[in-house]
């Protein structure tokens, strides 16, 4: 059994500087040269691929494997996102597929593998409403019950699993996971855990705490490539008498153990407060 590290303080779960501090100077210089010489051409080429792929998905009647192939094309050539699914034979079309969360492109890393229902707080994914089967969750507490009812209805249809990023937001994926939200684990549904890991060899981080989503996309598009590994774990079910919070914790610990990181009790709302505190501190310094 793998040793699971002790949970660190909240601040340790995130990245704060775009430029990595431990990257060798020659690699940093090489990457900066790449951005200046090749980067603008690569950015234009990838935006063209994205435009074509999205246009086909939105305006043309495609279905089945063709949709998946187009999404894989979009990720590989439009984003440089090289995805490998490890132990994918464990995929049993469970009612909920649960993963840790490290980037804006995580949903497409799964949607390019199979079809899912997906909860999203980002309206720009609504470019592909029917293709991705999105359940849009606005940040209003009064709509929480409506979102929960939509999730129950989606799972009840049984046509595709629900894709769940139960942390509620990104971490670096290197130190610890945030506490999993218990709602999706109260549905008496089989859960298929997945451990998602990003291998970024470049001297620039693909995400930093509190940054704009489009800034992250800009840096991702400038990377030559990034390798993403999705490790499929054995399906898990709720035990007799087990409450939803304990089941969610078991799934979180299984994913964290596979990643070799801690399973923290830090909640997403703590991350939100941390971002507010950092922005307030920066405003005072300015």
Image: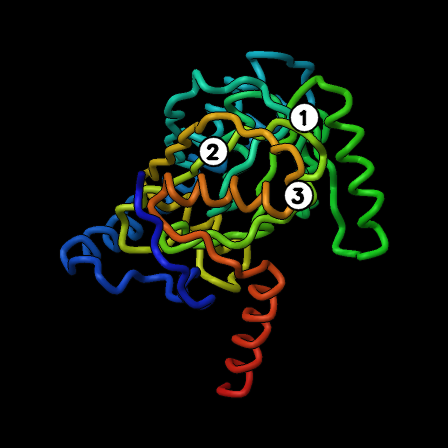
Nearer-N-terminus badge (1/3) = 1
**Residue labelled with disc 1:** 58
| Towards the viewer: 67 or 184 | 184
The residue mark sitting in front, 3 or 2, is 3
Tell me residue 229's x, y (percent). Answer: 37, 33
The residue mark sitting in front, 2 or 1, is 2
Give me the disc on residue 194.
2
Above or below, comparing residue 226 to residue 217 in the picture: above
**Residue labelled with disc 3:** 244
Q: Is residue 8 left or right of residue 217?
A: left
Tell me the residue at 55%/53% (across/down). Answer: 179
Tell me the residue at 68%/35% (across/down). Answer: 127
Q: What secondary structure is marked by label 3?
A: helix
Spatial separation of the CA atoms under disc 3 and disc 2: 19 Å
Above or below, comparing residue 100 to residue 8 in the picture: above
Tell me residue 44's x, y (percent). Answer: 44, 40
Residue 105 in view of the camera: no
Give me the disc on residue 5.
none
Above or below, comparing residue 266 to residue 193 in the picture: below
Tell me residue 227's x, y (percent). Answer: 34, 36
């Amino acid at each position: 059994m793998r040793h699971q590290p002790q949970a660190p303080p909240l601040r340790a779960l995130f990245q704060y500087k775009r430029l990595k501090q431990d990257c060798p100077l020659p690699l940093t210089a090489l990457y900066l040269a790449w951005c200046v010489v090749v980067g603008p051409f690569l950015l234009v080429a990838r935006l063209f691929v994205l435009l074509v792929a999205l246009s086909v998905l939105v305006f043309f009647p495609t279905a089945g494997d063709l949709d998946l192939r187009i999404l894989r094309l979009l990720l590989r050539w439009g984003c440089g996102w090289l995805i490998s699914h490890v132990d994918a034979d464990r995929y049993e079309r469970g009612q909920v597929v649960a993963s840790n969360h490290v980037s804006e492109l995580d949903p497409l890393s799964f949607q390019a593998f199979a079809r899912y229902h997906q909860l999203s707080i980002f309206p720009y994914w609504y470019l592909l409403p029917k293709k991705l089967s999105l359940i849009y969750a606005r940040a209003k507490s009064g709509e929480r019950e409506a979102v929960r009812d939509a999730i129950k209805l989606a799972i009840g249809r049984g046509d595709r699993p629900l894709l769940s990023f139960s942390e509620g937001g990104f971490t670096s994926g290197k130190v610890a996971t945030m506490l999993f939200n218990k709602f999706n684990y109260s549905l008496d549904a089989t859960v298929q855990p997945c451990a998602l890991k990003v291998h970024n060899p470049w001297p620039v981080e693909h995400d930093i705490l509190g940054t704009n989503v489009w800034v992250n996309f800009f840096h991702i598009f400038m990377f030559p490539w990034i390798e993403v590994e999705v490790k499929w774990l054995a399906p898990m079910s709720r035990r007799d008498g087990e409450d939803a919070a304990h089941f969610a914790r078991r799934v979180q610990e299984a994913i964290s153990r596979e990643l070799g990181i801690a399973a923290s009790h830090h909640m997403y709302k703590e991350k939100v407060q941390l971002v507010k505190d950092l922005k307030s501190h920066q405003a005072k310094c300015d």
